[in-house]
Image: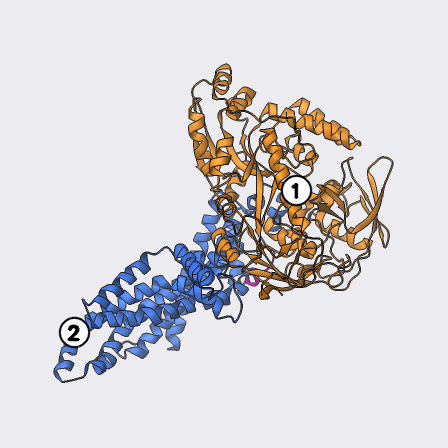
Chain colours: A blue, B orange
Amino acid sequence: MLRFILRRTLQMIPTLLAVVVIIFVIFSVIPGSFISSLMAEGRNATNADVMAHLNAQFGLDKPLPVRLWDYLWNLGHFDLGISYRTREPVWNVIEPRLWPSVKLALAAMCFAAAVGIPLGFLAALKPGSVFDTGTMMVAVSGLSLPEFWFGLLLMYVFALELGLLPSFGYQAGSFRHIILPAIALGVSPMALLARTTRAGVLDVMNADFIRTARAKGLSEPRLVRSHVTRNVLVLILTTLGLQVGSLMGQAIVIEKLFSWPGIGSLLVDSVSARDIPVVQGTVIVIVLWFLVINMLVDIAYAAIDPRIKVS
Amino acid sequence: MLTRLGFIAALALGTASAALAQDATPKDGGKLVFTAAYGNSITSLDITATPHTQDEIVAKAINRSLYKWNPESGKPELDLAESFTKSDDGKTYTYKLREATFHNGDKLDADDVVWSYNRLADPKKALPGAEQMLQIAGVAEFQAGKADHISGVKKIDDRTVEITVVNLADPGWNLMSNYAPIYSKDYPEDQLASKPNGLGPFKLANYVPGSKVELAKFDGYYEKGKPHLDKLDIMLMGEASARDVAFRNGEIDANILGPVQYDAYNQDPALKDHILEVAEVYTRNIGFNPKVKAFQDKRVRQAINYAINKDVIVTKLLKNKAYPAVSWLPISSPAFDKNAKPYAYDPEKAKALLKEAGFETGLKFSVTATSNESWGVPIVEAIIPMLAKVGVEVTTDPVESSVLSDKILSDNFETFIWSNSSGPDPLKYLNCFYSKTSQTACNYVKFSNADFDKLIEQAGNETDPAKQSDLLKQANNLLQEEAPVWFFNYNKAVMAYQPWVHGLKANAMELAIQDYEDIWIDDKAPASRK
């Protein structure tokens, strides 16, 4: 197990390196710069002297290869650099955004799993029924709903019309504040989970070993519990892992809409300001999150299905 | 048109007055939930390190400067200084500081002023706020590395500071800036970004980056009896639709409105009576780059001003959330000439001017524009058919905001559409068209006109305010005649507020920045605000 974790950790390094280099080069060649972003409001905010000093201070006057080497050297020493915008260490900028992001991603996934998996199961157990058709219609709608629009709809109904929940904002420890953004973010993975679970369950239900079990007189509840569920779990876990992994980066629109202080909105703000060190740091965190979650999923496979070995 | 402008301006002031008229007996206590509407994040709580309005909204509650802007009089007035004397040559000001206390208990003294201004101008720190120091004598030498401090800022005694400036302009216009606050020299500089220590009416209670700034009343604030509020929460809400829901739901107490919401709120009986409007000091324009040969001819620039029906755009697209522009200086500017008339919509005259200039056909150019609904691609799309009618072919060059400024500063554009500061100081902002002002400073269209330069120089050396204002009016009118830009509109900023909120001001500099110490809430406020 330890060897597996070590190997997977080492495998992350080239992935991260590739991402870092690509982002660095892209942001160095596309139009716009941190200096020009200071002028974006048209307020004559900087003069030529300030611009020149800022460029020198952040090493932006050096050639691209030198800047890239400096960045990689510092990264090798676990130094993400200094944010151009806030002039603080990049980690200090990212760290307060991390927990709200993780919390939102997990809450969204809990909603998706709690609703999507049972719906998919129940639909598959009664294929072709009204419930099945209805569930799949909900699933298709969930996948195609624009998050922004759905988020606004939730705000309108649950905050403005019913007055049950706050429409926006973040409060550490508040469950009420996370409900609407979690549902808005979780509706798409919920729909995907429902469809995947239904397909997986139907597939298993038609397998030979299920027919054999039925022939042996196993009751339907026990059949589902002992044979179907266990066999479909790997598929569900894979879908869950991929979704949880990507939710942190996908939450940008929802974070903006609900004023949720996550990594996604930080990334957007940093891109607009061409704050390359924070963009890099944020992307590294998102990629790491994705890789770690998927490694955990791989480990979980072995626990669910003894035929799979992590090694 | 001018009657209409005057009426609109009066209406704006009237709305403000109406809001203020209710403020006869302020009540103490309670909480205001304000919004910072220009994004979902704060760059830094150290306002000297950022040039963004979003950060200024918070900084105004925490810090104080030597002067402050008075939204009612439209002029700077003393804030941390309680009095001053001026030398005979009009360039040396001696300020007597008031007694004031920083949030950490430090007392304000002259060393704090000297230290704060030297820090701001320090070239090694490269702070955007350095812009506000440029009028002080010795700053140029300091920034060029020829001096180790600003020679024009001196401590006379603990309560007295002497500041020498390089011209006769009132230094209050620069030193009132929220970007030029006075900090305590003894406070650790590396904590300013996260744990600010100011002289303002509110101190930091809690900061959730990307979400909100919670502030608490500072009992040691120098104005007795203020602030009225116990707490001030500033929610970072860049999304207009979300703000709309939150405002209607009573979760926030003020909401900055865009054109569509302005229209909707005005038609809603429950909301229309609590709207504050003001003509802000921003001029939306299309700048012509003289490197395009056609734009070197004044007749072509004038023709474009005649060819576009800006009244229709303001009415239909901007839902009247703007004032059609006359020249560069906005309506609220003291040097705005009420007798000047804007370019009329006259396509025939435009055609004649283009023909005279030799561009009857074949004139093509692109407009570099962001997606902004009030001064971006939607506006360019509206002018394309208007200009096509006079034989001018226009295309759009869509970019994001930091690319727009990048293209302008690097002279990589044919024309651009932008919203630029045009006040409150008329001299400072007309100076952007002075030939010696660089393109990277603010002369984006590289305007050069000897008569205009002469007027600006005369105004800069004029000590009589009335005469100076007259010279600036002439310069502004000359600018209109020369048409280095298409004068589009002046922003009408609009804020909706809850009926229990009092003391908001029609701040022409930026409506979203308020004198929080004057705001109070009445008994109608919900329990969450008490």
What residue is disc 1 on?
Answer: A49
Alpha-carbon span between mark 1 and mark 2: 74 Å
Q: Are marks 1 and 2 in contact (CB under 8 Å)?
A: no
Which of the numbered marks, if any, corresponds to residue A238?
Answer: none
Q: Chain of mark 2?
A: A
Residue extending furthest toward the top: B356
What is the span of residues highlighted in magenta in the rendered image?
A88-92
Place of residue B241 in the rendered image (x, y in percent of width and height, measured from the top left): 47, 52
The C terminus of chain A - image quarter: bottom left
Place of residue A281 in the rendered image (x, y in percent of width and height, measured from the top left): 50, 59
The N terminus of chain A - image quarter: bottom left
| One can see residue B299 in this view | yes
Q: Nearer the viewer, residue B442 or A159?
A: A159
Quick one: label 1 or label 2, which is nearer the N terminus?
1
Which of the numbered marks, if any, corresponds to residue A207?
Answer: 2
| One can see residue B414 in this view | no
Q: Nearer the viewer, residue B116 or B221?
A: B221
Q: Which of the 4 image quadrants contains residue B204?
A: bottom right
In the image, residue B454 sits, relative to residue B370, either above or below, namely above
* Helix, strand or loop under label 2: loop
Residue extending furthest toward the bottom: A217
Place of residue B158 in the rendered image (x, y in percent of width and height, measured from the top left): 85, 55
Q: Chain of mark 1?
A: A
Q: Residue at x 65, y 47 (%)?
A: B18
